[in-house]
Amino acid sequence: MVNQPILWDSLTWQDSASAGDAVIIPVGAIEQHGPHLPLSVDARICEAVAHAVSAVSRVPVIPTLTYGVSGSHGDFNGTIALRPETLIAVVEDIIESLYASGVRQFILLNGHIWNNGSLDVSAEKLRVRHKDARVRALGYVTMYPGPEVDGHVTYGRGLMHANFFETSVMLHLHPELVHMDRVTSHTDVDSFWDYRMDQVSETGVWGRDVDEANAGHGRSEFERCVDTTARAVTAAVAEPWPNPKHRP
């Protein structure tokens, strides 16, 4: 029988007290994903990975933070964006609440690359405030090498968006929400700067060959994300804590 994820919000307060000292915090976004994908792509994929990782690692997962730092999409309709400072404050408050409940290990699982800066700041603030806690902010694809992510994107770093990879994963997870008859592609170009999405793409897509996206590829990419992240999280929560020498 396949294990089910441990959903923090489904526990009673007594059960949460015995659920361990680690937790997964998935962070997504509600933002445009081209004409063929729903606004909720980042939240849905991140949540699916987080739940699957929880099922394997037995680390509880809290409800997904749906909104993220998405203002750089510019004038495309539908995006709901938090300011970086807002996300930092929200994550800080969530961590403090969980810390008060006895949690000491925090995995900030990110589904949207523009959240990175805010999550890194949140992690730093936790490390400074609590010597008996540890935190890691990582993307759901972080645990296997970036070049292995088959997104059909050569350039753009954070601009990889609504592309072959994301479309394939959504065809695996939520095919009913994907409109392949509306697919467009965008040839990515090299640049030093990161731009607003509406400055570099007419449709909100960044990546080529989107019409070739398929559920089979999406399943293989999703399963690899889950497998590599679950193995990393399982090892992380069992990692010995440092024992530095006492300062004179």
Image (cartoon, rainbow, N blue to C red):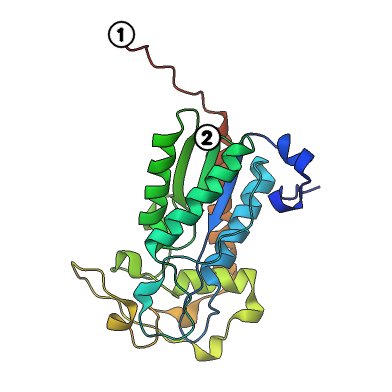
- Secondary structure of the residue carrying tag 1 is loop
Can you tell which mark lies on residue 236?
Answer: 2
The residue that label 1 is drawn on is: 248
Classify 86 as above or below 160. Answer: above
Q: Residue 77 sits in which quadrant?
A: bottom left
How far, Cα to Cα, is label 1 from label 2? Answer: 30 Å
Residue at position x 37%, y 12% from top? Answer: 245
Task: Give the image location of residue 205, x and y in percent.
Answer: 40, 80
Task: Give the image location of residue 215, x and y in percent.
Answer: 59, 71
Q: Residue 151 sits in which quadrant?
A: bottom left
Q: Is residue 137 left or right of residue 227?
A: left
Q: Amino acid at mark 2?
A: Ala
Q: How many marks?
A: 2
- Can you see residue 145? yes
Classify 171 as above or below 223. Answer: below
Task: Give the image location of residue 10, x and y in percent.
Answer: 76, 52
- Can you see residue 140? no
Residue at position x 51%, y 74% from top? Answer: 167
Q: Amino acid at mark 1?
A: Pro
From the image, which quarter does the C terminus lie in? top left
